[in-house]
Image (cartoon, rainbow, N blue to C red):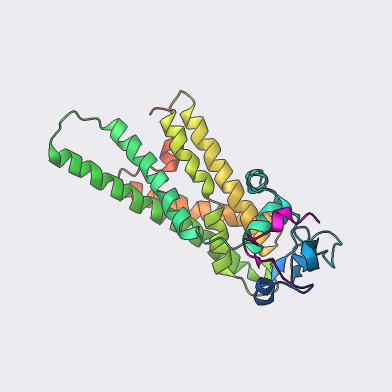
Amino acid sequence: VNPGPFKGTHPGLGSVEGAAATPTAASASCQYRCIECNEEAKELYRDYNHGVLKITICKSCQKPVDKYIEYDPVIILINAILCKAQAYRHILFNTKINIHGKLCIFCLLCEAYLRWWQLQDSNQSTDPDDLIRYAKEWDFYRMFAIASLEQTAFFIGIFTFLWVERPMTVKKKLNFILLLKALLLSSYGKLLLIPAVIWEHDYTPLCLKLIKVFVLTSNFQAIRVTLNINRKLSLLAILSGLLLESTMVYFFQRMEWDIGSDCAIYKSQDF
C-alpha cells in the first residue's frame, strides 16, 4: 500500500512511523469497526518495516476494514453528505472527533439566528432607542433557549423509543453516549440555515424544508449505523422524536410565545 496517506498521524490511529508488524498502539486501547459489515476489528492496518503498510481485511466479510483511511477528507465528507453508511461508520467508530459540543452550540446558534431574523423581519422598528436594541438582543437569547429545548425534546423522544423497544433493537446494552454524539454530528446540516437566509430569494421556504429533511435523513442514518438496527426502527425513532418536539412546539404556542419555530416557518410562505 502506498504509505503516502498514512504518513504521520491519522485521526484515531496515532503515529505509524517506526511501528512493527503488530497492531498500532491506539488499536490496543479501543475497538474499531468494519465499515462494510459493522463487525469489530482490533486494527485498521499494519505497518511493516520500511514503511510498508497493509490495510487489515475483515474476517467476517473479507473486505478492507476501513478503506477510507486512504481517502482524502473531502471525499469522506462528500460520502457523508450522501449519507453512505460506510462513511458514517468511519467517522463514528474509526476516528476520534471531539467537536460534538461545539458543533451542537454552533448549530443551535444558526437555528436561533434564523428564528430571530424571522421575528425581527415581522416586527420591524425604526426606533433607535437603546431599549429596543436591548429587547431584540434578549429575543435572540430566547430563541436560542427555545431551540435548545426543542432539540432536547427531539433527542429524548428518540432515546425513549429506543429504550422501550430495547429488546427489539440490539442484543447488548445501548450506548446512549455514542448515540448522542452520533446525533449531534449528524445534525451538521443545520449549518446550511445561515446561507439560506443570507442569500434570500423566493424559494427560501423550500430551502428550509429541504434542509430539515436532510438533517432528519442524517439523523436516521446515524441511528441505524450506531445501533446496527433496521430502517424501520430507525424511522420510528425519528418519528418519535418529531412527535415529542412537535408537542413542545404546541406547548410554547399555547403559552402564546412567539417562538419562530421550524414548524411555524415551514407552514408559512411569507417572510
Point out the image quarter for the N terminus. Answer: bottom right
Q: Quadrant of residue 165?
A: bottom right
Q: Let me know if residue 233 appears in the view.
A: no
**Most foreground residue, 164 or 25:** 25
For the point 69% across and 54% down, which residue is it? 232
Q: Residue 132: percent from the left, percent from the top?
A: 17, 39
Q: Main secondary structure of the magenta part?
A: loop
Q: Residue furthest front?
A: 50
Q: Is residue 168 above or below residue 125?
A: below
**Most foreground residue, 2 or 270:** 2
Q: Residue furthest right?
A: 62
Q: Is residue 32 above or below residue 75?
A: below
Q: Is residue 79 above or below residue 12?
A: above
Q: Residue furthest top?
A: 202
**Most foreground residue, 163 or 137:** 137
The residues colored magenta run 1-19
For the point 47% across and 53% down, which residue is it? 103
**Residue 271 belongs to magenta span:** no
Q: Residue 59: percent from the left, percent from the top?
A: 85, 68
**Residue 8 belongs to magenta span:** yes
Q: Residue 136: percent from the left, percent from the top?
A: 23, 41
Compared across the picture, whether 67 is left or right of 117 comes to: right
